[in-house]
Image (cartoon, helix red, strand yellow):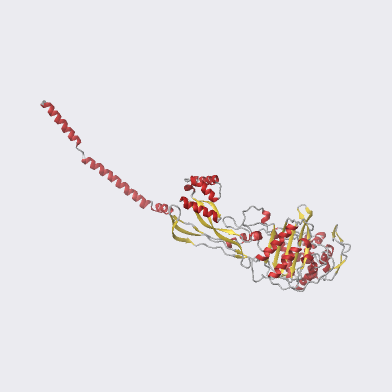
Amino acid sequence: MAPSKVRLRRAERAVRARQRIPDFGLRRAMLGTMLGVALVAVGATAFYRQVIQTEYLKTEGAARYLREPAIPARRGMVTDRHGEPLAISTSVASIWADPVRLTGNDGIIPALAAALELAPDKLEARLRTAAAKGRRFIYLRRRVEPPIADAVTALIEQHKLAGLGMETEYRRYYPGGEMFGQVVGFTNIDDEGQEGIELIENDQLRAIPGRRRVIQDGRSTTVEEVEQLRPPHHGSDVVLSIDRRLQFLAYRELKAAMLEHRAAGASAVLLDVTTGEVLALVNQPSFNPNAPRREGPAARRNRALTDVFEPGSTMKPLVVAAALEAGVVQPGTPINTSPGVLQVGRNRVRDIHNYGLLDATSVITKSSNVGVVKIAQRIERKRLWELYSALGFGKATGVGFPGEVNGRLTHFSRWSAFEYATLAFGYGLSVNTMQLAQAYSVLAADGVRHPVTLYRTDQPGAGERVLSEETARQVRAMMETVVSNKGTARRAAVPGYRVAGKTGTAKKATGHGYAAGRYQAVFAGMAPASKPRFVMVVMVDEPRGSSYYGGTVAAPTFAKVMQAALRLYNVPPDAAAEQMMLAGGEG
């Protein structure tokens, strides 16, 4: 080989050898630069996280495991006078969900809907809508029955579901059902009172939930309780004057009377004379507060306080009381009612019979319109108006019930001669059942008016004298004749007790005058007549049976409930009322 070629190959091998030798200096410089940049980046990031974003990161971290759930509180209980529960709160489960988590698990929706007893398509649409809005918490169903809660619990455990859970709330339950519907009322889904005592005493009954801080895992299961932020405040109990036993009896008898006479409605009030306490307050139709709200407003009305009627002949004893107070008549004062018709201006007042010559007592016994108008004509109009007003007509009773009406009593200066006459036998004014019971309790309490109350009280409120004791006793004795063989309320008698009372049968007023063939039957009475313990008023609206008189429609209900009340409260019988054999009329 030529020497030149050998030298060329040696030169090429030398070049290739030099090319394979790495440049370690350059590499060291590049690596150092990269490590320096990385170190600066780590340091800057650490500084940013630890110094600048400290509070933000702490908040975000805590939000992923710290929760502040509510501590449920119990709404106060409503009881009757003997401590029997009328409204109580029981713990139940409410089902909640995190829509964002659940929407990624579409396969579970049908099973969840079945457990919740909901339509799958509606549940899925609801979850998707909430997730689209970024909501992380919604209630799927609140205050569910135990079987539903058990089914959801089993589903969570079976599928290890995250984003679905339960919390404890309280559900209102009414043991008395429809017997107490209009009195106790009901609450809404948020446990706020909507009607009745639940609304009146909402501030006292209301529960204020507490708040606690807990640690939860990724499935929202509580791992540890950190602290209690606010203790729960349970509502206070409310004790009513209502006696559950008498309420049941009054409800049963009033409902039976309404069905028997095919009436449009009815109400009844039973008062304790000595304290003014309401022992029973019932209405028909009624509703069950435990059931879903599907009934109409008419069923929720507490008719004894919200509905007014013209009291008819039940006002006659009060007119006679005013005349006795004025000294213009005595129980035996003769009143000539012949020929059964009385001309007053251009109008006439009529009796259903020509009773002829009566005395003041017999005017009440026979329920004579002519007789009571002649008695009223002996009294100054102002005096009768003052008595009606003092008895509570035209003003609220003071029980504070939602929707209570005042009724209507116009000033005496606006009465015409005929209006004054009609006021004597219960037309031209309107009252509710509670007002009429309160007025009769004045006669029962020897002329003293005590405030009526729906709450239990051991001491009666301060009374106001309206009539003299002598007048009240005289009128009671006169009303005893109504509940006799010659009176209009023989069916109001209670065996072994003397009963005083008065019937009322009034045509029903409408927006177009008095409706033909439509009446309101009333009986108001008290027992024992010698020293009354109870007063009761029964009003039946539009009876459509064979009779529509107060003595045949309302009086029997009075007798049955009054008899039970006297026995339950161990009221001793007084001397039996004299049995009079004279035939009686209707009024």
Q: Is residue 569 visible?
A: yes
Q: Residue furthest right?
A: 339
- 486 displayed left or right of 219: right
Residue 444, percent from left and from top: 74, 70
Specify the quadrant that holds the N terminus. Answer: top left
Residue 404, percent from left and from top: 68, 59
Residue 506, percent from left and from top: 78, 59
Q: Is residue 161 visible?
A: no
Q: Nearer the viewer, residue 72 or 552?
A: 552
- 554 displayed left or right of 143: right
User: How many callouts does the rendering have?
Assistant: 0
Specify the quadrant that holds the C terminus. Answer: bottom right
Q: Nearer the viewer, residue 380 or 177?
A: 177
Q: Nearer the viewer, residue 582 or 54?
A: 582
- Dividing the picture into quadrants, the one containing residue 376 is bottom right
Residue 268, percent from left and from top: 71, 62
Q: Nearer the viewer, residue 219 or 230?
A: 219
- Dividing the picture into quadrants, the one containing residue 216 is bottom left
Relative to 346, say whether 23 is above or below. above
Q: Residue furthest top?
A: 2
